[in-house]
Amino acid sequence: MDSLVQTILAKVAKLPAKRTLMYDVEGFEEDQVTALQEKLTAAADLHVEVTGTRHHPVLEIHQ
């Protein structure tokens, strides 16, 4: 999971200021999505929320 967090953070770092990255987490268990959300929030000053549906969740990462 740590390599996934680093990959997402690298993508966010490449974004222009005040942009949003949508990251599809379909296929992840609910507790995995929550853990990923917490790790991203702890690793950087980001606002991360889960959007989409229960069967097709998406992480919305705001810089």
Image (cartoon, rainbow, N blue to C red):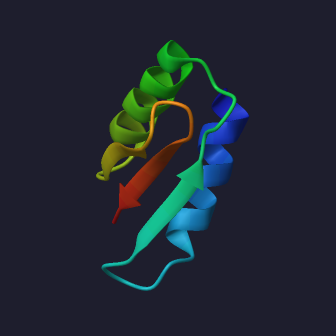
Q: As rendered, which of 27 and 18 lies closer to the eye? A: 27
Q: Hey, which residue is sitting farthest top in the picture? A: 31
Quarter of the view holding residue 34 = top left
Q: As rendered, which of 33 and 38 lies closer to the eye? A: 33
Q: Position of residue 14 (x, y in %)?
A: 57, 76
Quarter placement of the C terminus:
bottom left
Q: Is residue 44 above or below residue 53?
A: below
Residue at 34% across / 39% down in the picture? 41
Q: Is residue 33 above or below residue 26?
A: above
Total marks in image: 0
Quarter placement of the N terminus:
top right
Quarter of the view holding residue 55 = top right
Q: Position of residue 16 (x, y in %)?
A: 44, 85
Q: Is residue 32 left or right of residue 17?
A: right
Q: Position of residue 21 (x, y in %)?
A: 48, 65
Q: Is residue 54 above or below residue 22?
A: above
Q: Is residue 1 left or right of residue 61?
A: right
Q: As rendered, which of 53 and 14 lies closer to the eye? A: 53
Residue at 63% across / 45% down in the picture? 6
Q: As rendered, which of 49 and 11 lies closer to the eye? A: 49
